[in-house]
Image (cartoon, rainbow, N blue to C red):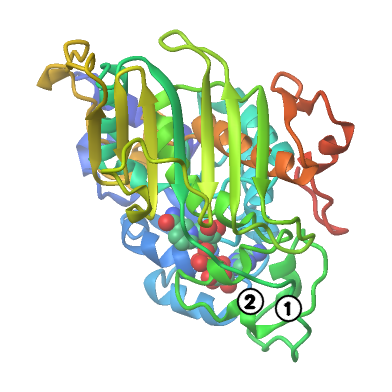
């Protein structure tokens, strides 16, 4: 039995009282009960994971910046160092990987890890193209009985996510008809940065570019400060998808968690004029989602960069919520941000008799820690809230909005084949070319 199978078997066995397990024998902190993990992208956002990861065995760290490796090594002194994730991922004895690199490498590292049967925690956004999102989700679905996956939308652990879902399902606004999410972050960039000097000796800039086309080095891509540096590069198409992948991953999660959606059947978008180098600041996208067992077909919208939905009432100023969501039902509105919610019954008929709040015992249980949920999943229960099925579908939807934006009109989407059916040109925007030597599957 290999180590991963043993970890899994021991956790399952822990629920069977008569079987003596490693867990029972040595306790949760025993070295043999810990996951062997690689941290890829070892500084910046990764620092938010350090304390949690220190409860496991971080046996490999990988970063294209040797100074960042030095800093990570202080936390994980025994870990082997790598600059190239394609080598790190084959480090002997790994159970899983935690990916905190820039967005343009997420899908590749994730696919290579899944192909090696490694558990994966990947920072948001999971993918930069529809092709990437679909391949990751399909691969995960084939392996979901053995692999644990989580996308780093850690706000999902806030109790408000569960409370919003309960209010929608229990009918606090009547029958759900429509939902939207918005974010007001605005990072305006004119275009790729001009060449400015040589990369410092500590930075392997070629590996940083990875699968993306060559762009000259400019220190401004690296000037953002710890855990904020993503804002220096995520607006450029070759490195990110602007707010769709950035705050959009968190904020659409408020809606996604409450609507049990299948992929959209259409998308339309409008925003500022298309810029071939930089993703739009202002953008509005509308999606049509099919009906499910508990609600009719519905419209879902995403607004960013100053674009906003109409307020349901002059008493409510939605602009006071930087990153929020609104659900529209036959009887009223539910407005929320990540931590708070507000139900507004509207109209004389909205007397709340239709709302059947659940008993306390039926409240959706708290997940008790987002990273911990993934650790426990890797060790055997395989249950994560933002696995690559859930989060893969959500980013597929959001990215389809950008396809519609680039196509400049309403697109019809066949989720079974992953193709746009009414606009051939739009199908070109479903994928990207990787630089020579880099591939999505490895
Ligand atoms: N969940 C959240 O709330 C949250 C918050 C901030 C950032 N993020 C996400 O985390 C990721 C990293 O963001 P950041 O601000 O830390 O960015 P960053 O530019 O600081 O990069 C993070 C680290 O990855 C290293 N790196 C870059 N390319 C690499 C490669 N190919 N292989 C290995 N290491 C590489 C960098 O040197 C750096 O140490 C982004 O995808 C971002 O969206 C998530």
Which residue is depicted at the point 63% across and 35% down? 396
Position of 132 relative to 81 (above/below): above
424 vs 379, left or right, is right
Q: Residues within 10 Å of mark 1 (few under 14, many from 20)?
A: some
| CB at disc 2 and ligand 1 closer than 8 Å | yes
Q: Which residue is mark 2?
A: 221
Which residue is depicted at the point 45% across and 25% down? 178
Residue 175 at what x, y percent from top left? 36, 14
Among all residues in the image, which is located at the extreme top?
293
Q: Quadrant of the C terminus?
A: top right
Residue 204 at what x, y percent from top left? 70, 77
Choose between 48 and 168: the one closer to the eye.
168
380 vs 160, left or right, is right
Choose between 173 and 40: the one closer to the eye.
173
Q: Residues within 10 Å of mark 2 (few under 14, many from 20)?
A: some
At numbered mark 2, what does the secondary structure look like: helix, strand or loop? helix
237 vs 252, left or right, is right
| Circles 1 and 2 in contact, beta carbons < 8 Å | yes
Q: Which residue is mark 1?
A: 193
């Amino acid at each position: 039995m290999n180590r991963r199978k043993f970890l899994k078997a021991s956790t399952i066995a822990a629920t069977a009282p008569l079987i003596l397990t490693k867990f029972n024998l040595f306790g949760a902190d025993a070295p043999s009960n810990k996951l062997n993990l690689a941290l890829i992208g070892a500084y910046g956002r990764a620092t938010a994971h350090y304390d949690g990861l220190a409860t496991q065995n971080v046996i490999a760290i990988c970063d294209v910046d040797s100074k960042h490796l030095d800093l990570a090594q202080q936390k994980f002194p025994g870990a082997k160092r790598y600059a190239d994730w394609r080598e790190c991922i084959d480090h002997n004895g790994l159970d899983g990987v935690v990916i905190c690199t820039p967005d343009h490498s997420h899908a590749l590292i994730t696919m290579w890890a899944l192909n090696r049967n490694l558990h994966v925690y990947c920072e948001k956004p999971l993918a930069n193209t529809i092709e990437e999102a679909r391949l990751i989700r399909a691969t995960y679905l084939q392996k979901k009985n053995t692999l644990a996956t989580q996308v780093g939308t850690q706000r999902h652990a806030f109790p408000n996510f569960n409370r919003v879902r309960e209010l929608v399902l229990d009918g606090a606004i009547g029958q759900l008809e429509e939902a939207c999410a918005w974010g007001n972050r605005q990072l305006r960039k004119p275009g790729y940065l001009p060449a400015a000097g040589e990369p410092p000796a500590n930075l392997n800039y070629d590996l940083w570019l990875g699968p993306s086309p060559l762009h000259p080095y400019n220190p401004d891509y690296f000037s953002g400060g710890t855990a904020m540096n993503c804002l220096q590069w995520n607006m450029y198409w070759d490195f990110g998808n602007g707010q769709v992948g950035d705050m959009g991953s968190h904020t659409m999660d408020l809606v996604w968690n409450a609507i049990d959606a299948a992929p959209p059947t259409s998308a339309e978008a409008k925003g500022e004029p298309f810029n071939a180098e930089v993703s739009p600041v202002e953008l509005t996208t509308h999606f049509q989602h099919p009906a499910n067992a508990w609600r009719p077909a519905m419209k879902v919208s995403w607004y960013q960069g100053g674009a906003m939905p109409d307020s349901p009432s002059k008493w409510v100023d939605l602009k006071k919520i930087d990153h929020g969501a609104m659900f529209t039902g036959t009887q009223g509105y539910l407005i929320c941000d990540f931590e708070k919610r507000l139900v507004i019954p509207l109209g004389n008929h909205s007397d709340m008799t239709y709302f059947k709040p659940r008993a306390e015992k039926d409240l959706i249980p708290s997940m008790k820690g987002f990273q911990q949920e993934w650790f426990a999943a890797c060790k055997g229960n395989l249950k994560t809230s933002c696995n690559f099925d859930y989060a893969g579908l959500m980013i597929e939807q959001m990215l389809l909005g950008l396809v519609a934006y680039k196509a400049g009109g309403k697109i019809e989407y066949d989720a079974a084949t992953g193709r746009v059916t009414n606009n051939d040109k739009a199908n070109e925007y479903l994928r990207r070319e990787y630089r020579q030597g880099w591939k999505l599957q490895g």
